[in-house]
Structures are given as structure tokens and as C-alpha cells.
């Protein structure tokens, strides 16, 4: 099978499939005729397993250990449950602080921020971890960056099309034949379509968090 077929079958994007290959979790064969990756049923099964455990938040190293037979599913789950319980405790710490703040009267300027930060630092010294909203901020920046880059390219190509049409209408005697003009216009038009499709794919990748896969584990 080709990577496009595997993407549709398993529901994992080509980018993530290649990422898992780079991480050594997948080793598809190669087509002898063209050298392209050739995925089989075993590769599909591995990807389904990876998808299952990644949805549970399991680190890549744990999946790698299970694949190599150095860890059973039960052992990996025991370790992961410890991590999940720790995360649950961290969420509970955050909820308690939020509930305490909910009962606070007054405006932001009246808030004892320093005292709350000291309390959070004490909890962190005890092993607590509080969420860092910066990740969402970075994701928003990626959305903006993708839109700006795409908009710039689309605007430029659309400007070329408008310029060519304007020149054809204002100087018909010196303009290129209409069939030739339409053929030339087709090039920037195709670029615009390609940019829009790439933008849609990029938004999907950012939304799914694929950009951060390599950073997570």
C-alpha cells in the first residue's frame, strides 16, 4: 500500500506516519521498481497500535519498549497510570486555586498575586505541576503565521491575474492572443488553489498538534 492509502485507512496523516518512521516505530519495505515505501498489513497494525496508545497519551519510548518486547502492555500501563494520577493531582491543585480565586472579591488590582505565586511555588516544590498556557499562545501564532503567508501569496498571484486582464482590456492590439493569455493565467490560478489547499492541511496539522509531536517525547 502507498502512504496515501494508509493515511485514509488508519486516520494518521502522512507527516505523522513519517515521524513515527523516524522514531523507529515503523519500518516499511521499499518497492523494488520505484523505491517508494510499500506498507503491508503488519505496518497498518503497528500504526493502529501507535494511534491507540498515543490517544491515551503514552510516551513514544513506552511504545518502543512494548514493540521490542522489553515491556508488557500491563507493565507499560502501570507506569502510565502513575503519570496520569500525577496529572490528575495537578489538575486538582489548579482547580482548588481557581475555586479559591472564584470566592475572591474585588478587582484584579486588589489581588494578592505575590502570595498566590508563593503558594504555587510551594506546591511545585512538592511535585505539583501547573499548566503552561504558552503552548496555546504558540499555536495561535502558528495559525496567524500560516494565514499571513498564504494571504501574501494569494494576493500576489491574484494581482498578477488582475494585471494581465487589465493589460488585455486596455491594450488589446498589443496583448497576447486570448488562448495564450488564459493559459498563462492558469498558472497563478493553480498556485492559488495549491496555497489554499496547503493552508487547509496546515491548519489541520496545527489543530491536531502534530507540529509538537517531536517536542513531546
Image (spheres, helix red, strand yellow):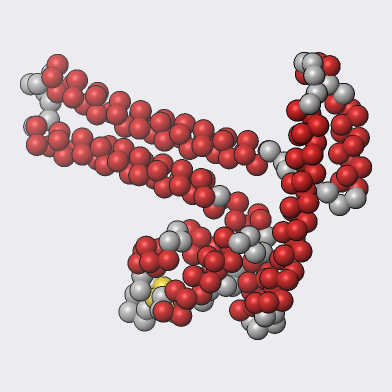
Measured as percent of width and height from the top left, residue 88 is found at 74, 52
Query: Which residue occupies 14% across, 16% down?
Result: 170
Instruction: Give the vertical position of 66 relative to 173 (above or below).
Output: below
For residue 177, which quarter of the picture? top left
Q: How many marks?
A: 0
For residue 72, which quarter of the picture? bottom right
The C terminus sits in image quarter: bottom right
Query: Which residue occupies 21% across, 35% down?
Result: 185
Instruction: Give the vertical position of 93 relative to 100 (above or below).
Output: below
Instruction: Give the vertical position of 60 relative to 97 (above or below).
Output: below
Measured as percent of width and height from the top left, residue 116 is found at 87, 31
Instruction: Give the vertical position of 41 relative to 139 (above or below).
Output: below
Judging depth in this view, the residue of 149 and 180 nearest the camera is 149
Judging depth in this view, the residue of 44 and 33 nearest the camera is 44
Q: In this image, 216 relative to 51: left or right?
A: right
Measured as percent of width and height from the top left, residue 22 is found at 57, 67
Amino acid at each position: 500500500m502507498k502512504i496515501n492509502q494508509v493515511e485514509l485507512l488508519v486516520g494518521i496523516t502522512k507527516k505523522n506516519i513519517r515521524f513515527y518512521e523516524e522514531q523507529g516505530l515503523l519500518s516499511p519495505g521499499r518497492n523494488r521498481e520505484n523505491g517508494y515505501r510499500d506498507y503491508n498489513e503488519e505496518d497498518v497494525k503497528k500504526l493502529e497500535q501507535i494511534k491507540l496508545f498515543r490517544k491515551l497519551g503514552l510516551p513514544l519510548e513506552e511504545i518502543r519498549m512494548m514493540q521490542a518486547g522489553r515491556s508488557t502492555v500491563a507493565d507499560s500501563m502501570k507506569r502510565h497510570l502513575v503519570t496520569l494520577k500525577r496529572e490528575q493531582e495537578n489538575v486538582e491543585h489548579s482547580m482548588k486555586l481557581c475555586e479559591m480565586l472564584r470566592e475572591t472579591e474585588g478587582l484584579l488590582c486588589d489581588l494578592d498575586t505575590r502570595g498566590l505565586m508563593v503558594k504555587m511555588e510551594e506546591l511545585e516544590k512538592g511535585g505539583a505541576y501547573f499548566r503552561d498556557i504558552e503552548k496555546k499562545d504558540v499555536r495561535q501564532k502558528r495559525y496567524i503565521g500560516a494565514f499571513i503567508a498564504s494571504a501574501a501569496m494569494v494576493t500576489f498571484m491574484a494581482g498578477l491575474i488582475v494585471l494581465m486582464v487589465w493589460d488585455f482590456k486596455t491594450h488589446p492590439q498589443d496583448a497576447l492572443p486570448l488562448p495564450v493569455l488564459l493559459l498563462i493565467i492558469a498558472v497563478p490560478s493553480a498556485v492559488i488553489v495549491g496555497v489554499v489547499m496547503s493552508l487547509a492541511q496546515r491548519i489541520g496539522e496545527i489543530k491536531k498538534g502534530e507540529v509538537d509531536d517531536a517536542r513531546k517525547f
